[in-house]
Amino acid sequence: MYACASTFVHVQPPPMAEIMARAKGLQRPEVLEVYQTYGALMRRRCRIVLRNDALADDVLQTVFVNLIRYGGAFRDAHSKLAFLYTACDRACWALLDKRNRREAREQKYQAPQPAPAAERIADRDLIMKVLHTLDPELRDLALLIYVDGLSQGEAGKRLGCSRQTINKKSQQITAWAKGLIGEQ
């Protein structure tokens, strides 16, 4: 019972079966009708956002699977096309975000390329000649900087030292290697 301007109006709630049916997704005939009516527009929208036909088809399939599962909100939507465009846009952006996160992770774990400077290559060759004579701590540092090509900051993070400490130790390694070889 609801009070409305000093009169009580009794509103009968819908039966539970109707509520449950609306909460569920779309049925096969409804999905077929949506696909025939809006499928081409939805695919075009996905192609515009993703710029890839195969990915657009995958996203479109995902949107229809979600309509089958959770289509109750679609039935209640004021503008069906706006609802579907929003669903397509969100699915496309989710896919792009997922791809960007994966690419960022892959770039993070790629081995960095050593700097091609002639001085660095000469230092690397020198260090490789005397690497076996270094103590283990300096050997690890030499491998990280001169073989793996990590920057001093990256090597510091890996070894748990500051960049300044790595810089000093790197200079020590180079000076010590030059001393063993007899260079000045």
Image (cartoon, rainbow, N blue to C red):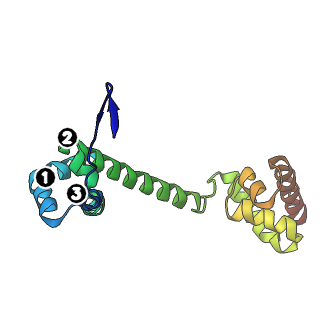
Q: Is residue 79 above or below residue 125?
A: above
Residue position for label 1: 40
Q: Amino acid at mark 1?
A: Ala
Q: Is residue 9 above or below residue 71?
A: above
Residue 146 x %, y %: 72, 61
Q: In screen coordinates, is 96 left or right of 27?
A: right
Q: Is residue 41 above or below residue 143?
A: above
Q: Which quadrant, please, contains the N terminus?
A: top left
Q: Earlier in the sequence, mark 1 or mark 2?
A: 1
Mark 2 or 3: the one toward you: 2
- The answer to whether residue 175 is visible is yes
- The answer to whether residue 48 is visible is no
What is the number of the mark on residue 53?
3
Q: Residue at x 89, y 70 (%)?
A: 135
Mark 1 or 2: the one toward you: 2
Residue position for label 2: 79
